[in-house]
Image (cartoon, grey):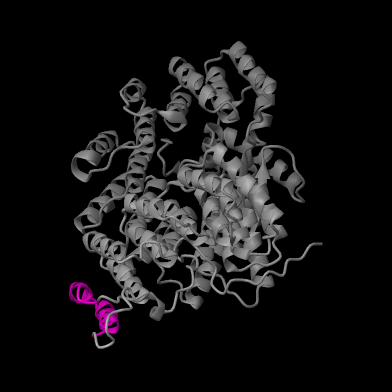
Amino acid sequence: MWAFHTPQPTQPPSLFNPPPTPPKLPSSSLTLNPSISNSTPNHNQLIQSLCKQGDLKQAFKLLSREPNASQRTYEVLILSCADQNSLSLAQSLHSHISENGFDQDPFLVTKLISMYAALDSLDDARKVFDKTRKRTIFVWNALFRALTLAGFGEEVLGLYRKMNRIGLPSDRFTYTYVLKACVASECMVSLLNKGKEIHAHILRHGLEGYVHIMTTLVDMYARFGCVAHASFVFEKMPVRNVVSWSAMMACYAKNGKPFEALELFREMMIETQDSAPNSVTMVSVLQACAALSALEQGKLVHAYILRRGLDSVLPVISALITMYARCGELELGQRIFDQMEKRDVVSWNSLISSYGLHGYGKKAMQIFQEMIHQGVSPSPITFVSVLGACSHAGLVEEGKKLFDSMLKEHGTHPSVEHYACMVDLLGRANRLEEAAKIIDEMRIEPGAKVWGSLLGSCRIHCNVELAERASHRLFQLEPHSAGNYVLLADIYAEAEMWDDVKRVRKLLETRSLQKVAGRSWIEVRRKMYSFVSVDEPNPQIELIQSLLIKLAAEMKEKGYSPQTKVVLYDLDESEKERILLGHSEKLAVAFGLINTKKGETIRITKNLRLCEDCHSFTKFISKFTNKEILVRDVNRFHHFQNGVCSCGDYW
């Protein structure tokens, strides 16, 4: 086993912690005019003191009378221009530096590039770089950092190729920035391949001992959804710190593997004695708890956050609000929000989306108006949250007015996500022609999200004509997404177009695409259990199946009628009913009935949309067994109690 004993940097770099700049030259060797008499007053110390006091204008006046400005003086002035956000003074200082022959000093060049980046003047940063005759690796890194921060990933990778052609060796900071550049703009496949090439360079140069490089690799693969690649890099890391553990947890949490995220958190708590989880770690853990509706584990995490004093960190509080809401405890989320001393737009977004998820569209709109009244500017995500809330509650006119106000009142141009929300809003309300018209009139390419929203609405209302139009575009945009084929087959099946169902299923087979299996999770006594829509090992599976058969028979006498139309196969009714009883959410409900106490709420999470039969079945179960059941599917929350669902059968 190879071991690398490269000395670790004392302070790992990040995009917010620039890499080291070239060593400063002694100030005495930087005198601009050595012939000047020693009796000439030296104002360097005073200029530096004025900068530290924030009196930049007075410092500039004194600079004009100082012929022997030192490198340190210029450095302090550059930092002050960035701190005071003054581009005009920065450009004036740059001119002074150039006139006095310091514009080729590598140390000051890196500082100038960083200054212009902080002032959002990348053109000036590029000009500094272009005019530098001898570019050290520090100069290249400074520009890489500036461009990566601004999202110009492809430009960074182009410059990186140029640097390699001239034979300048990369250092450990270079690799960090070019890896981040792969995901700085959009996660395109071509940039993933470039990231893999950089990974190969790192291995060839024996740099896998640097924890910050390997952590950046984990993050890069995570952003592209390459969970297996990220996990491989993480497992091979000879040294890990809290940042690397957090990066891998975030990878699992954001890529549909919440089980793995929680397991990794437990492993981290056991293995790491010297580094405690930070706020970034806790956000990922809370996201995993939210994804699984793991309320009891979420409460334990909340207690840990309080002990560690992380309850004042805004991203952590926002994640707590979301976690409680996604676990069905909306009131707890509201209580945390009410107790916040300071709120940002992310906190408001968390609360708005929480009410939307539970179907309280009017309350979500009310919170949005309160946020505006308090002077918080909405972000693009805010509008996605509010429009989604309107969609779940059927508030069509309110949603249309909000969409129209985005640009007129808030200066926000609608993106593909916002158009997808509008298509979903209209489509769910069976205003499909209006939804299709919005797509036709879009000034930007609709993309898969918009067409997917239309196809999903066609599935609800069985509109074959529009479904075929939407699926035709989706097959072009997402040729490997089995879900689109399954939705079209669902629509054909409901319309009893069995030949077309067979044709779509044949397409799935010939293209080697597999339908995502329905999966449901339930938490019982702080332990998570998973069920899929096929037979799997479970010590209570026979008991679960017999209970479902018994309940189905008894509920039929009370009016329950299995909705066999959701079964895509042309089979007899009894066989369709048998298939329906194997749906994952029914298995989870039965498991919950067996393993929870009287009066204890059953909480279930489903990875797909709740089917019509499972929705009807669970309503009957809640009344028949006098049990409160919460089911969160991919769209929203369903709160079943006494035979009624909170969605009002609108989902």
Q: Which residues are magenta?
A: 41-66
How many marks the image carries: the answer is 0
Apparent side of residue 314 relative to residue 227 in the rendered image (left or right): left
Q: Give the overall secondary structure of the magenta segment.
A: helix
Q: Is residue 645 visible?
A: yes
Q: Which of the 4 quarters of the picture holds residue 405?
A: top left
**Rendered view: 554 above or below 478:** below
Q: Outermost residue toward the front?
A: 35
Of 228 and 512, nearer the camera is 228
Residue 44 lies in the magenta-colored region: yes
x 59%, y 51%: residue: 167
Q: Is residue 473 above or below residue 58?
A: above
Q: Relative to the observer, which residue lies in front, 12 or 527?
A: 12
Q: Looking at the figure, which quarter contains the N terminus? A: bottom right
For this view, does 64 lie left or right of residue 488?
Answer: left
Pinpoint residue 42: horizontal percent, then vertical percent: 27, 84
Task: Pinpoint residue 456: horizontal percent, then vertical percent.
Answer: 47, 29
Q: Quadrant of the C terminus?
A: top left
Residue at 23% over, 74% down: 63
Q: Is residue 262 left or right of residue 159?
A: right
Instruction: Give x and y (percent) for residue 79.
Output: 33, 69
Query: Can the viewer see residue 291?
Result: no
* Relative vertical location of residue 404 with respect to residue 525 in this rendering, above or below: above
Residue at (67% x, 45% y) in the render: 531
Percent coordinates x, y for residue 497 in the rendering: 56, 13
Is 6 displayed left or right of 9 in the figure? right
261 or 155, which lies in front? 155
Question: Is 199 contained in the magenta span?
Answer: no
| Residue located at (50% from left, 71% from top) | 305
Q: Residue furthest top?
A: 499
